[in-house]
Amino acid sequence: MPDDSLPPLTLRLRVRVSLRLLFSVRRHDFRAARTFMAMTFPKDPPVVRVLKFISWALTQMWCTIPDAMRHTRFATKVSKVPTWLKDGNPLANHPWAERPQATLAKVADTVVIGCGLAGCAVAYHWGRKAPLGRKLVALDMADAATGSAGRNEGLVVMGRYYHMVVQTVLPYLHEVRRDLTAEQQMQLAKQFAAHYAQACYRNGDMVERTVREEGFDCDYAREGWVQARDEDQQASLAESVRMALKSGYTDWMSITPEEVKRRTGMNVRHNAGFSIAAASFHPAKWCWSLLGRGMESSRVEHFSRTKTLGIDDASDEYIVRTERGEIRARHVVLCTESYTPLLMPQFHDLIRATQTQAASGPGGPPEMKPHVGISGSRGFFGRHGGETMIGSDATRVPDREAGRIQPSRFLTHYLCTELQTAFGRAPYTITNEWSGTVSYTPDEYPVVGVFDGRSQYILGGMAGSGTAVSFNGARCIVNRILGDTSEPDDYPYDYFSPMRLLDPAEHKWPKLEEAT
Ligand SMILES: Cc1cc2nc3c(=O)[nH]c(=O)nc-3n(C[C@H](O)[C@H](O)[C@H](O)COP(=O)(O)OP(=O)(O)OC[C@H]3O[C@@H](n4cnc5c(N)ncnc54)[C@H](O)[C@@H]3O)c2cc1C
């Protein structure tokens, strides 16, 4: 839209936008502000950070946001339903909607709790592999794919690239492996990164193969994921690419601003990171397809709107207590991600609920390419059909706020300005705005394995990269429960066991390999 067709940036518009922003401020805005300050002014002392932030926020409220609001509109009633769920949920209130007289299973071989990316993947693999007579019951306290699985950006990521894993695991090793020298800690962190990357790469290929072979209708396309980097991050980008290549993990590379423009339509001044093998899909359709295919076998039953209240250990089995009755099971798989500490308090501070938010609506810059993952320096962008999605944030919230929908309206406004900077001006209407919680472990490394020394498994701690871990992780857990050793297990105990967090002193840590 040419500038002269825009409403003028009048004093009245500035006052109206500023007042609306002030009245929209909620508790989460203050928490998100802390995250923003830590990311944007990392080297400044706290007082300087706050002063810089106030100055930045005032400029946003008075200048930048009112300017962006000349071509951006919020619908009169912005819905909190994530874009992926707005056309309904084929498994809503299952089976109660079709069969109100249905009763909850009383006995199962395995109960999986939580039907998001992880739980639906467990149900899918179970349906394919379990012999007749071994039943899996999949429970969700809401409907399948209504947790973060149905609220995300829709990227099938290759996870966190090798260098990033080294950077997050190393500080944890400094804490819990003080017996090692600095070089040995670094070597161990690299081994962690290698195992993570290997499992993720296989996961990404398995997702693609499954979509094709099963004929899942989930809008899958593999166009990669571009991640902008500021000037001061260029050295780290170059180092991350060098380190990954040296270790044989070739997914992660650096691309020029021209290449960024060609792939995404985004304008950047500096080189960006590029994950070649990342893909995009409709995450909720993926979950429903997996669970639906699992249920087509006689070995999987699903009960939505059935909250698990607790799990009792009855020596050779477990009693899963739910709102609708009890289920006796030999194995339990927790796929409750950020909700986990509410069910299992021992995971408090180990599975840390962390809020991320998004908004979407019709319009947005036509230059933005569909299907490719796009991250700017402060947020992400995506084009899905005729709609544009924007999102950001990674702020820890208390356990009890897991799953709450409480997006910051200020942040959504700010993302509209970032969208404009990255792609240019275009009319855009925000109709949906939501948030979700992901979970981070202290080393930001996932947990895949048994946590009670017997048969309670957890698949979680995926650090906002659930698509990178859940499908392969679920396959490995199902194989372990069924005793199937015919396939590679990409989640060895020494690395992925939750015991490295629950009891690091007693955990059997991996052996150190020759320095790489
Ligand atoms: C805005 C946003 C953008 C994101 N973008 C991406 C992305 O592009 N790519 C990516 O890989 N990841 C992304 N993520 C993260 C990703 O969505 C998560 O990693 C993923 O959804 C985790 O899947 P999950 O199945 O473990 O957990 P969830 O999807 O959160 O599912 C947990 C389920 O457990 C159920 N549950 C909890 N407690 C109980 C109980 N007591 N009884 C019964 N059921 C229970 C919940 O109802 C829920 O359905 C994003 C997240 C957000 C919020």
Image: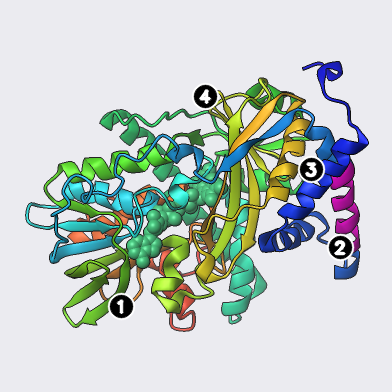
- Of residue 72 and residue 212, the one placed in the foreground of this image is 72
Q: Quadrant of the N terminus?
A: top right
N-terminal of the pair, mark 4 or mark 2, is 2
What's the amino acid at mark 2?
Arg
Within the magenta stretch, is there residue 398?
no
Helix, strand or loop status at disc 3: loop
N-terminal of the pair, mark 4 or mark 1, is 4
Q: Is residue 34 left or right of residue 332?
A: right
Helix, strand or loop status at disc 2: helix
Within the magenta stretch, is there residue 58?
yes
Residue at 65 percent across and 26 percent down: it is 264
- Of residue 404 and residue 510, the one placed in the foreground of this image is 404
Foreground label between 1 and 2: 2
What is the chief secondary structure element of the magenta stretch?
helix
Q: Which residue is mark 2?
A: 49
What's the amino acid at mark 1?
Gly
Q: Which residue is mark 3?
A: 230
The span picked out in magenta is 50-62
Helix, strand or loop status at disc 1: loop
Q: CA distance from mark 4 to mark 3?
A: 29 Å
